[in-house]
Amino acid sequence: MFKKVALPLATLGTLFAGVALAAPAGAHGYVSSPPSRQALCASGAVSGCGQIQYEPQSVEAAKGSTKCSGGNEAFRELDDESRDWPHTAVGTSETFNWTLTARHRTSTWQYYIGGTLIEEFDDKNAVPNATVSHQVDLSGYTGEQTLLAVWNIGDTPMAFYNCIDLDIGGSGSGNGSGNGNSGNPQQPTVEPTDGTDQPDETTAPQYPDDEPTTTVPTTGAPGAGEPTETPQEPEAEGDWQDWTWYNRGDKVTYDGVTYECRQSHTTLPGWEPPVVLALWLPE
């Protein structure tokens, strides 16, 4: 079921040369907390979402859109304001966490409310980490608001779009939660949406680092760091571990919940089963 993964290092002081990593084809990234609309659909907190429930990470469209779907007709349900989208209660400052299942060179990350740009983070065309966090100032707004989060890719004309429904300074509503992990996600699609930046099971892509990234406005790319962990077998069969290879169909336990692996991959820090809905299916 599980096997140890070799992590070759060129020399001391260099970054790891590669990890055998199979990201789901067509997978890219989404805001996992506070839960975006696609995260709520994937978790089952909101039903009847159409195709997006299978691939929350795939809301990709040309740059410049102001729609939750990015103008991508396949995900038009995300634009439906008649739905009872749960609002997550937040304060006047909130950390927005992205889960990236395929990492593209990044121009900027942008956050909008009501069409107004309230925060921008410049990555200067660097490759981000597997998880990215941004602290966003919401002090100019109160009550129920819909925030649009945009990940602008650095070497293509495309961007990824997420809408997050917030209750700023309020108590929230519905099933929204800060971790976006309620309910049971559905089986994701594995059909590719483009032919670039997609590692496969036999390729060892070179990534700058794999620690969670926290950036601040206009300070540049995420900081690099050398991995301090080496791939390992789970300590006990069924216990989820990072830096470990799992095959599709393998089952693990995390925080008392059993998950089934949806796509063969090497786990990275920040890719815990309840966080990466595209890779793990809770039972």
Image (cartoon, rainbow, N blue to C red):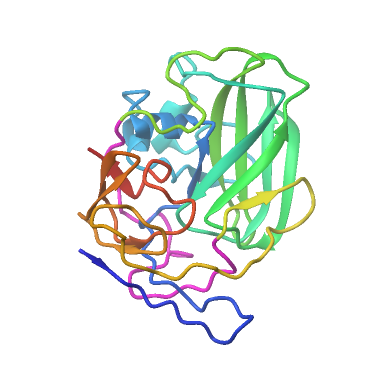
The quarter in which the N terminus is drawn is bottom left
Q: Nearer the viewer, residue 62 or 187?
A: 187
Tell me which residue sits at (45%, 71%) in the image: 230
Up-down relation of residue 215 to residue 93 (above or below):
below
Outermost residue toward the front in this view: 235
Up-down relation of residue 48 to residue 130 (above or below):
above
Task: Where is residue 93? Give x, y as percent.
Answer: 71, 29
Q: Quadrant of residue 25?
A: bottom left
Relative to 174, 135 lies left or right: right
Magenta stretch: residue 201 in it? yes
The quarter in which the C terminus is drawn is top left
Task: Where is residue 249? Give x, y as percent.
Answer: 20, 54
Tell me which residue sits at (43%, 64%) in the image: 198
Q: Quadrant of residue 257?
A: top left
Task: Where is residue 267? Give x, y as percent.
Answer: 40, 59
Q: Please, what is the dominant secondary structure of the magenta stretch? A: loop
Q: Is residue 151 visible?
A: yes
Q: Quadrant of residue 114?
A: top right
Task: Where is residue 181? Give x, y as percent.
Answer: 40, 33
Magenta stretch: residue 27 in it? no
Q: Is residue 76 visible?
A: no
**Extent of the magenta region:** 184-210
Outermost residue toward the bottom in this view: 11
